[in-house]
Image: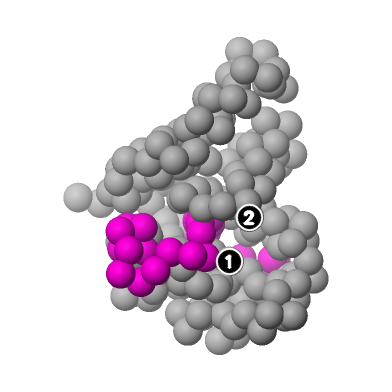
């Protein structure tokens, strides 16, 4: 595992679009959630994307494992915050950066990602979804793609939609995040919106068949 010092260094190491995947650390290896995350990581890698996660257990592990089996690069965004419980990065992390705290970690995710996929999770994943929605809504940086797999987070987005006025006229909260049911559908959406990872950041290509 290579430890780099900043998101800038990691993006240079990645040299292709980075897709950040958020999700629960509790997903067991034999669970459906773990299997779906592993499939997602593999499909992303096979389409040329670099896969990034929190780098620990559960879905974070599964998606990087899939990326490795798919022949791609994997990034873990770790944090000193978990040192008090001796939480160790999973063995599929190829390159990492270590944030001081949880807020710093979310900021690094945002700097690294060209797109974000949110899988089922708990409070940590909720925070990551909320910050991603806020960043996109306020156009803090160039527009980025936010996707959710399945309907797990749909009630949360629906509640926000009743309370939040989008920052830009004509937008809706629903337009800021898209939902797909399967890993294959998610990768197709990515390819349509930001292009295949193989062609880099400057070009857009049709998804592979």
Q: Is residue 54 left or right of residue 190?
A: right
Q: Earlier in the sequence, mark 1 or mark 2?
A: 1
Label 1 SS: loop
Q: Is residue 128 visible?
A: no
Image quarter (top left, top right, bottom left or bottom right) of the N terminus: bottom right
Scheme by which the image is coloured: one colour
Residue denoted by label 1: 54
Kindly identify which numbered label has been placed on residue 127: none
Q: Residue furthest top?
A: 170
Residue denoted by label 2: 124
Q: Residue at x 25, y 51 (%)?
A: 208
The picture quadrant where one finds residue 158 is top right
The picture quadrant where one finds residue 135 is top right
Q: Is residue 152 above or below residue 71?
A: above
User: Distance from label 1 to label 2 (Cα)?
Assistant: 10 Å
Q: Which residues make up the magenta segment?
A: 7-36
Q: Is residue 110 left or right of residue 179?
A: right
């Amino acid at each position: 595992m290579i430890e780099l010092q900043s998101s800038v260094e990691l993006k240079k190491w990645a040299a292709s679009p980075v897709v950040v995947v958020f999700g629960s650390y509790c997903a067991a290896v034999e669970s459906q959630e773990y299997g779906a995350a592993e499939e997602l990581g593999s499909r992303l890698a096979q389409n040329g994307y670099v896969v990034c996660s929190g780098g620990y257990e559960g879905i974070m592990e599964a998606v990087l494992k899939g990326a490795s089996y798919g022949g791609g690069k994997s990034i873990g965004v770790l944090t000193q915050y978990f040192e008090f419980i001796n939480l160790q990065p999973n063995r599929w992390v190829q390159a990492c950066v270590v944030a001081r705290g949880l807020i710093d970690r979310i900021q690094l995710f945002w700097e690294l990602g060209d797109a974000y996929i949110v899988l089922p999770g708990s409070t940590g994943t909720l925070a990551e979804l909320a910050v991603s929605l806020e960043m996109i809504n306020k156009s803090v940086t160039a527009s980025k793609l936010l996707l959710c797999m399945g309907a797990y987070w749909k009630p949360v987005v629906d509640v926000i939609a009743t309370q939040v006025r989008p920052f830009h006229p004509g937008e809706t909260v629903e337009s800021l995040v898209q939902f797909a049911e399967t890993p294959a559908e998610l990768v197709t959406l990515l390819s349509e919106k930001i292009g295949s990872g193989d062609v880099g950041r400057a070009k857009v290509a049709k998804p592979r068949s």
